[in-house]
């Protein structure tokens, strides 16, 4: 093994996808999708329903071949070296398909055996995984009799039972109650580092909470990717301040707009003589001081003054909406 | 090859659900009824022939009990074997579990063989219970063991062929009923194809009767072990399993 003296040395990506395309008959599910995921990273795959998330994951998990392009997991091609890839992944498909007539422990034992966990370690490994996924107390129950939350955890347990390098989780928290969602998320977070995780979701806060990076996919193509901070910066170049003032709206708009560096002023809720406004300015500028001085000069009553962060949700809406606008533009 | 874990899983699914018990129970009930009927008729015929010495020459246990029993059992198999195999792939496809199964580090061939052997093992278990009938014949009458052995070998081959066709049908669809109807249809076609051999005649008639799935079964009951018949069934099984493998692969591309 090579000695690594510099932690910054570029590691080969764990997942590498190049120009991946998949057609179902005349329908193109994904088109020219390219991305890579570094070892130990958790990446969120974000997109509206039918965007191509599941298709990409099915190709990565070797369930079906792509129509074009290539995908590599741990350096192995998903098509040419399918068996090598399959040994290194744990996959949780979208609807958590499990054998309802099997009992939890014997099901996990089956999966461990198929995935090549040695007989001597199998029992201990299954017990460990059940413990980690909090399903030890239902281990003798039939899977079909379990609640959705438990089934989801059994699904996650079968994905991690062979301790694979890569986890591919398709909507791992869908259909759970808030407490279960929190549990599953912390479980996934605890897997980072040892495992490379790619998870799809359409719940935006989930990505900000769990993931290091995000890939936004819409209508079969990647529209944005990077760390959440980079994306916010890329799509919202400005800084924003929310201000509530008791003053005539027209005068306020003019006053705020006159502050140097302010790009735009928009109304949030504006009534008679009082209103909340959103002030956008250049990113590196803090206009709160100027707003305060303006208010005190004009004897406006200042009720609230705070910076507003950009959320991934807004990035997502802007990206997806922008995509739709640009798609429709040439036709118009 | 990871055939063993797949085999164990399928056996577990057969026996934790009522499938194995219902199919096995119905099979034994029908087979038992046929055995009783045939044996009772034989007893009656024997008593009559005791009074009519000319008739006695025609009577022997192999021809009067074993062969009719085997041919009755083969009809039950025609009806029941599609039920044994119909869930093997169709159910996995309908419930989506195939997406996990086919992404585990197991080759499609190993999955197929594991499932096929599980269905075959269930069939062997069912058949073992019917050994009671020849055992009773041995006790009460003078039965030659040769035709019994070849008869059971014939049943094993015939059942294995039905199962192979059934597993192929199951790989075509996600609907178990369609899977069972398709396999029943294929088997029945191959069963009756020999019937038109007489009208067609000549070389084509020979081809048709050689294609028939049941014409090859007859000689086993007489105690004749013909390589031609064994090869026919083995070929049929290999071809059906090969087509199943191709169908699984085609399904992957379709997504």
Image (spheres, coloured by chain):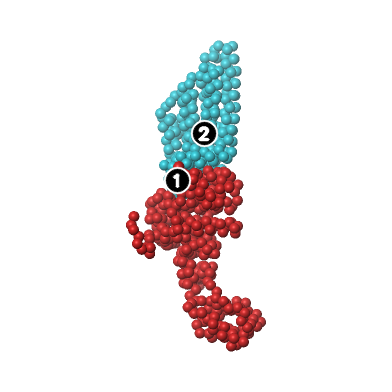
Residue B103 placed where, x, y %?
46, 49
Looking at this view, name the residue that lies furthest to the bottom: A297
Look at mark 1 in the image and give the residue it sits on. A117
Name the disc covering residue A92, or none: none
Q: Quadrant of residue A202?
A: bottom right
Residues at marks 2 and 1 on the same chain: no
Q: Is residue A105 visible?
A: yes
Colour red belongs to chain: A
Towards the viewer: A326 or A271: A271
**Residue occupying image coordinates x 57% and y 25%:** B35
Q: Residues within 10 Å of mark 2 (few under 14, many from 20)?
A: many
Which is in the foreground here, disc 2 or disc 1?
1
Q: Secondary structure at mark 1?
A: loop
Q: Is residue B83 visible?
A: no
Towards the viewer: A100 or A115: A115
Q: Label 2, label 1: how many angstroms apart (C-alpha)?
A: 31 Å
Residue B151 placed where, x, y %?
48, 26
**Residue occupying image coordinates x 57% and y 58%:** A181
**Residue occupying image coordinates x 57% and y 21%:** B39
- Chain at numbered mark 1: A
The relative height of residue B234 versus residue B173 in the rendered view (above or below) is above
The relative height of residue A155 versus residue A283 in the rendered view (above or below) is above
Looking at this view, name the residue that lies furthest to the right: A272
Colour cyan belongs to chain: B
Towards the viewer: B120 or A208: A208
Residue B33 placed where, x, y %?
60, 27
Towards the viewer: B79 or B53: B79
Look at mark 2 in the image and give the residue it sits on. B123
């Amino acid at each position: 093994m090579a000695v690594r003296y510099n932690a910054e040395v570029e590691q080969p990506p764990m997942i590498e996808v190049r120009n991946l395309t998949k057609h179902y008959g005349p329908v193109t599910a994904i088109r020219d999708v390219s991305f890579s995921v570094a070892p130990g990273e958790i990446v969120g795959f974000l997109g509206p329903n039918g965007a191509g998330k599941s298709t990409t994951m099915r190709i990565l998990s070797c369930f079906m071949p792509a129509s074009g392009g290539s995908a590599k997991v741990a350096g192995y091609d998903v098509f040419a070296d399918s068996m090598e890839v399959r040994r290194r992944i744990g996959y949780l498909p979208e609807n958590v398909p499990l054998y309802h007539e099997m009992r939890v422990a014997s099901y996990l034992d089956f999966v461990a055996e198929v995935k090549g966990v040695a007989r001597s370690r199998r029992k201990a490994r299954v017990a460990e995984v059940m413990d980690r996924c909090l399903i030890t107390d239902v281990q003798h129950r039939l899977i079909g009799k379990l609640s959705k939350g438990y089934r989801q955890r059994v699904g996650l347990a079968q994905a991690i039972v062979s301790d694979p390098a890569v986890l591919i989780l398709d909507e791992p928290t869908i259909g759970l109650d808030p407490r279960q969602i929190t549990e599953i998320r912390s479980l996934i977070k605890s897997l980072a580092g040892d495992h490379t995780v790619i998870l799809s979701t359409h719940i935006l806060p989930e990505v900000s909470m769990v993931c290091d990076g995000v890939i936004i996919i819409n209508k079969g193509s990647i529209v944005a990717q990077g760390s959440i901070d980079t994306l916010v910066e890329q799509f919202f170049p400005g800084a924003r301040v929310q201000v509530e003032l008791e003053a005539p709206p027209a005068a306020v708009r003019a006053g705020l707009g006159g502050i140097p560096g302010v790009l735009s002023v928009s109304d949030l809720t504006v009534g008679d003589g009082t209103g909340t406004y959103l002030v956008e300015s250049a990113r590196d500028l803090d206009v709160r001081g100027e707003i305060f001085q303006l208010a005190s000069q004009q004897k406006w009553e200042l009720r609230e003054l705070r910076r507003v962060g950009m959320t991934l949700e807004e990035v997502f809406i802007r990206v997806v909406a922008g995509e739709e606008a640009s798609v429709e533009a040439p036709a118009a | 090859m990871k055939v063993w874990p797949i085999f164990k899983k399928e056996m577990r699914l057969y026996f934790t659900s009522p499938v194995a018990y219902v199919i096995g129970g119905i099979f034994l009930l029908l087979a038992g009824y046929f055995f009783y009927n045939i044996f009772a008729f034989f007893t009656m015929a024997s008593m009559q022939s005791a009074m009519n010495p000319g008739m006695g020459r025609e009577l022997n246990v192999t021809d009067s009990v074993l062969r009719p029993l085997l041919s009755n059992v083969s009809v039950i198999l025609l009806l029941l074997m599609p039920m044994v195999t119909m869930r093997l792939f169709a159910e996995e496809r309908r419930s989506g579990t195939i997406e996990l199964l086919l992404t585990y580090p197991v080759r499609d061939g190993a999955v197929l063989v594991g499932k096929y052997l599980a269905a075959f093992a269930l069939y062997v278990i069912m058949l073992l219970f019917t050994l009671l009938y020849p055992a009773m014949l041995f006790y009460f009458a003078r039965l030659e063991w040769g035709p019994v052995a070849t008869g059971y070998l014939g049943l094993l081959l015939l059942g294995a062929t039905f199962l192979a066709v059934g597993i192929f049908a199951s790989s075509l669809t996600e609907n178990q009923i369609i899977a069972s109807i398709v396999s029943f249809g294929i088997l029945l076609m191959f069963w009756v194809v020999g019937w038109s051999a007489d009208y067609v005649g000549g070389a084509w008639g020979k081809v048709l009767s050689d294609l028939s799935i049941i014409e090859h079964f007859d000689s086993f009951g007489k105690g004749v072990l013909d390589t031609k018949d064994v090869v026919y069934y083995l070929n049929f099984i290999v071809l059906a399993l090969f087509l199943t493998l191709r169908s699984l692969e085609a399904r992957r591309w379709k997504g």
